[in-house]
Image (spheres, helix red, strand yellow):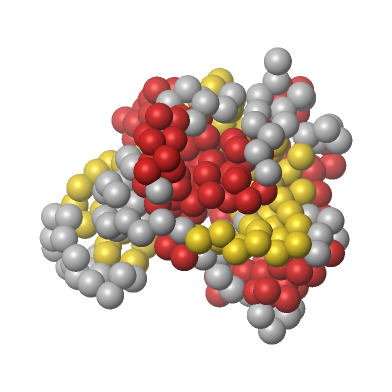
Amino acid sequence: MGYDIVSIGALLCEVMRKELDKPLDRPADFTGPYPSGDSGIMLNGAAKLGARCAMIGVVGDDPFGCCITRRLRESGADCSMVRVCSRASTGVAFVCYYGDGSRSFLYHVHDAACGDMDERDMHIEKITGARWLHVTGFAMSVCPGAARAIHRMMEELPEDTKVCFDPNIRPEALGVEKTRELCKPVLDRASIVFPSKGEAMMFNDTDTDDEGCRKWAAQGKIVVLKNGEKGCCVYAGDQVMDVPGFPVTEVDPTGAGDIFCGAFLVALCEGKNLRDCARFANGAGALSVGKQGPMEGSPDRRELEDFLAAH
């Protein structure tokens, strides 16, 4: 039996400030490493909820690489397609948080192991039969080799494997037109898109995200607009559903949107309707912000079901 969800992307370790308002250009204490990377966070969340999952990516032959793959395996994900690169160290993201809720990131990815991804990491033959392939824009922006590999996967992927796309890309780094060009092959193939604020309008050249989401939905895509603590809005054909989030105490919001995506795909694989998928995903995202570290608060099945039953 094939995988439910396969994700291809950049695997990182995250090292973060222990206290608020400690900028990265000043001496202060850090905590970590925490396994991270948007694709890995999503996959870890889906595996913990019971989906059959596999990761495609590259880590270094070092303790940070072990930190990531150990966590994914502990959660039940298959890491046999995670390549260990001896020429480069595992990617790292340094993070600091501010009292106003903003964050600052310093990435070491382009020359790290995750930047070594290329067409040898496609593994089309191994993922034949998978229900979903999850791709993010960040993964393609890491290096040209990763983008080429993902673009070729869009051409060679079996028709019965659907594509889920989470843009998660910074247009200020590439420019809007180049960002659109980079993501077009994946967007053309995608059955579901998970935009965050500003992304639907940017990709579709509309004045609002609502217009952008409706444009994608008119093309036959399911669009799930992530609205953080407010929940999400689901667009499917002419139908638009606002599904509220859950009030929780936030400790660390990093990765909540990725865990949301993983939970939504799990619910979809289980045959839930779109509103129930959204509620299931909102619950997973809400629980995920309760602990420091992007994967640390990701709930298992019992935790999420108990939380939803209590709300």
Instruction: Identify the residue at horizontal 27%, vertical 47% (top origin).
Output: 291
Q: Residue at x 55, y 70 (%)?
A: 197
Q: Kindly indicate the quadrant of the structure image that contains residue 20.
A: bottom left
Q: Quadrant of residue 266?
A: top right
Of all residues, the one furthest to the front in this rendering is 310
| Depicted 13 relative to depicted 53: above or below | below
The image position of residue 96, as x and y in percent, is 27, 62
Q: Relative to the observer, which residue lies in front, 97 or 223?
A: 223
Look at 42% across and 62% down and name the residue there. 229
Left/right of residue 106 with respect to residue 210 in the rendered view: left
Q: Position of residue 26 (x, y in %)?
A: 17, 68
Does residue 125 appear left or right of residue 5 in this picture? Answer: right
For this orientation, the residue located farthest to the left is 28
Q: In this view of the protein, can residue 214 be seen by the observer?
A: yes
Residue located farthest toward the bottom when viewing the structure as drawn: 207
Q: Nearer the viewer, residue 119 or 233?
A: 233
Judge whether 250 appears above or below 277 on screen.
below
| Visible residue check, residue 7 | no
Q: Tell me which corner region of the image, top left, top right, bottom left or bottom right, holds residue 119.
A: top right
Q: Seen in the image, is 50 located left or right of residue 148?
A: left
Q: Quadrant of the N terminus?
A: top right
Front-lying residue, 211 or 66: 211
Residue 262 vertical position relative to residue 222 in the rendered view, above or below: above
